[in-house]
């Protein structure tokens, strides 16, 4: 089980209130409320197409909300000036589902890209920073000159995570971080996330379908269904719930960890 955060669990770093978002006439998020606490790993789950990634992208500003407020570190992102928004964005890192590495850039250039945007460092320091971040995720300098097309799926995820950590963020958004990985690779990635969260004191917002990740990494779980967050709490709360969707998800045929005695 993931180690519980040592920081104050009531210290809210992401506050979502009454958020409505969608595409055209289709409403995906229907008055969503959610808090994310400093230092926790929050697993965000829901059915396919429920809007998990939509909420993450709305929080970081890639999707425009129609209603409601989103505060990050106490800053109302809808009312923030460009300078205020940029200051908040400097404090988060993002791992998109497919890695979203720039295909025309090498691994080293991908890692240096966000640093160049915010900091004025010499090339020598940029190179040293890139190697340090790669080592942080279990890779080394030998991959620096490779292009994304030359990387395995697991390496792509690690490079993308290294890029997300390039600016020493306080919050990391992970969109399906173990998707496409074999069970061993997914388990290794879960361990990496837990280790980084513990050693760096990160707050992690993790969109996932992976039940193993929910059991082994997450401190709390929030569940999205019918456009709303219908439950939020530790795994024990999810397992005890009588809600039909939660019962099907956490006690279904694939939920072997939830019922270890199942034959």
Image (cartoon, rainbow, N blue to C red):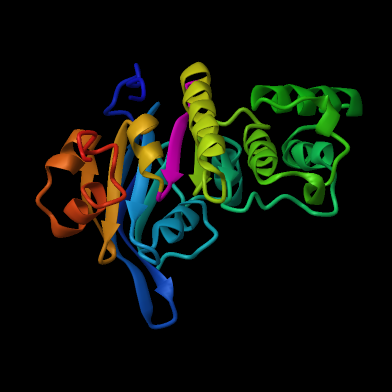
Name which residue lies at 78% across and 48% down.
148
Q: Is residue 237 left or right of residue 42?
A: left
Residue 170 showing in the rendered view: no
Q: Is residue 208 magenta?
A: yes
In this view, the residue in front, 256 or 158, is 256
Residue 214 showing in the rendered view: yes
In this view, the residue in front, 183 or 51, is 183
In this view, the residue in front, 205 or 103, is 103
Q: Is residue 51 left or right of residue 146?
A: left
In this view, the residue in front, 212 or 229, is 212
Q: Is residue 206 left or right of residue 125?
A: left
> Which residue is situated farthest in the left direction here?
242
| Magenta-colored span | 201-209
Quarter the N terminus occupies: top left
The percent coordinates of residue 208 (x first, y second) are 42, 48
The percent coordinates of residue 118 (x first, y second) are 72, 37
Q: Note whether 224 is above or below 217 in the view shown.
A: below
């Amino acid at each position: 089980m993931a180690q519980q955060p040592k920081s104050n669990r009531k210290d809210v770093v992401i506050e979502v209130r009454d958020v409505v978002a969608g595409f055209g006439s289709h409403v995906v998020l229907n008055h969503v409320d959610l808090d994310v606490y400093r230092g926790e790993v929050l697993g965000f789950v829901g059915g396919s197409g429920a809007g998990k990634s939509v909420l993450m992208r709305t929080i970081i500003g890639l999707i425009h909300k129609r209603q409601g407020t989103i505060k990050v570190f106490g800053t109302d992102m809808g009312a923030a000036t460009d300078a205020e928004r940029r200051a908040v964005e400097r404090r988060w890192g993002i791992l998109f589902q497919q890695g979203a590495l720039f295909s025309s850039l090498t691994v080293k250039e991908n890692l240096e890209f966000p640093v160049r945007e915010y900091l004025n460092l010499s090339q020598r320091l940029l190179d040293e920073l890139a190697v340090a971040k790669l080592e942080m995720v279990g890779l080394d300098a030998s991959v620096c000159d490779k292009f994304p097309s030359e990387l395995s799926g697991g390496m792509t995820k690690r490079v993308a995570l290294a890029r997300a950590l390039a600016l020493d963020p306080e919050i990391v958004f992970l969109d399906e971080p173990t998707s496409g990985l074999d069970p061993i690779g997914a388990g290794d990635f879960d361990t990496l996330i837990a280790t980084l969260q513990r050693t760096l004191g990160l707050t992690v917002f993790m969109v996932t379908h992976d039940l193993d990740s929910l059991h082994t990494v997450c401190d709390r779980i929030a569940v999205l269904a019918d456009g709303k967050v219908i439950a939020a709490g530790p795994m024990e709360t999810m397992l005890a719930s009588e809600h039909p969707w939660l019962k099907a998800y956490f006690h279904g045929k694939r939920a072997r960890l939830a019922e270890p005695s199942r034959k």
